[in-house]
Image (cartoon, helix red, strand yellow):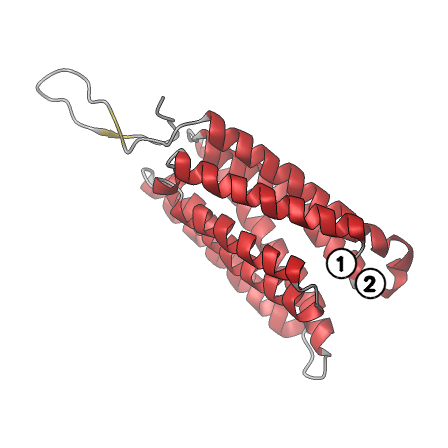
Amino acid sequence: MSVLQQVLGWLSVLQMVVLFGVLILRRHYQRVPLFTIYVGGVTLSNAMYALHSTWETWMLHQVVTAALRFGVALELTRCIFGAFPAAAATARRVMLVILVFTAVTAITFSTPGAAYTRMHAESIPRMASAAIWILTALAALVLWYRLPLAPLPRAILMGYAPYLLVFTIGMSLLFDAGSQRIRVWVGYVDPLAFFVLVNYWCRVAWRTAAESVLLPAPAGPRATAVPAVGRAAT
């Protein structure tokens, strides 16, 4: 790992610590607890890799990140479609199809004699691709049903999918024997793209207050509380 890569790595750790603090300070953890756990878990995992940069710690970092990433996808589904049962049922079916397809392709294309590094070279981009398809499907369903969306969930949804596309392409090039000339740039493009993504999340999280659970009920004897979907409290 070069000096510039180490600098980018530690800047990412510092920025994730800032994001975690903003989520706690602005009380976003009440609405997106799994995303808050994702930020904390990735921060610790990234710091561990920065302190001990080996292949094993990098692979552990990728596995932890992938597991937390699926948790964020599930949480986004709950935040977006919680008050819309029909859309929520469609979202669950789409996610199930994507996960089953990912599992089947991983089993089909993995050979018993594959090397340890090759297995991870194939599995990590597939897990990232599954997350891309899930987030893209969620965004498509939001547009299809014209659902309101709060600023922070929108930033997570709309910002993570493009980054994961960059990450997946980078992982494919990293383990491609024919891409040796551009392989070195993968170690710079991916952390730089992640730095831009986290900076975007920090700004959105800081500018918006934690979403309220209920909207104010209208005056009148028949007034009832209405779920606050997509509305940020000010």
Q: Inspect this view and state whether residue 144 appears.
A: no
In the displayed image of the protein, which residue is found farthest to the left?
A: 221
Tell me which corner region of the image, top left, top right, bottom left or bottom right, holds residue 81: top left
Residue at 72% over, 73% down: 117
Q: Nearer the viewer, residue 200 or 128?
A: 200
Q: Is any part of residue 47 visible from this angle?
A: yes
Above or below residue 169? Residue 222 is: above
Q: Is residue 217 left or right of residue 33?
A: left
Q: Position of residue 57 (x, y in %)?
A: 64, 67
Where is residue 43 drawn, in percent x and y? 55, 52
Q: Name the residue at 72% across, 79% down.
A: 114
Q: Nearer the viewer, residue 64 or 223?
A: 64
Quadrant holding the C terminus: top left
Residue 182 % position (x, y): 87, 52
Q: Is residue 49 above or below residue 108?
A: above
Mark 2, residue position: 176
Quarter of the image with the N terminus is bottom right
Q: Are marks 2 and 1 in contact (CB under 8 Å)?
A: yes
At 54% from the left edge and 56% from the top edge, which residue is drawn? 44
Q: Which residue is mark 1?
A: 172
Residue at the far top in the pictured view: 219
Residue farthest toward the bottom in the current orientation of the protein:
113
Q: Type of residue at label 2? A: Asp
Q: Which residue does the image show at 24% across and 29% down from the upper left?
A: 226
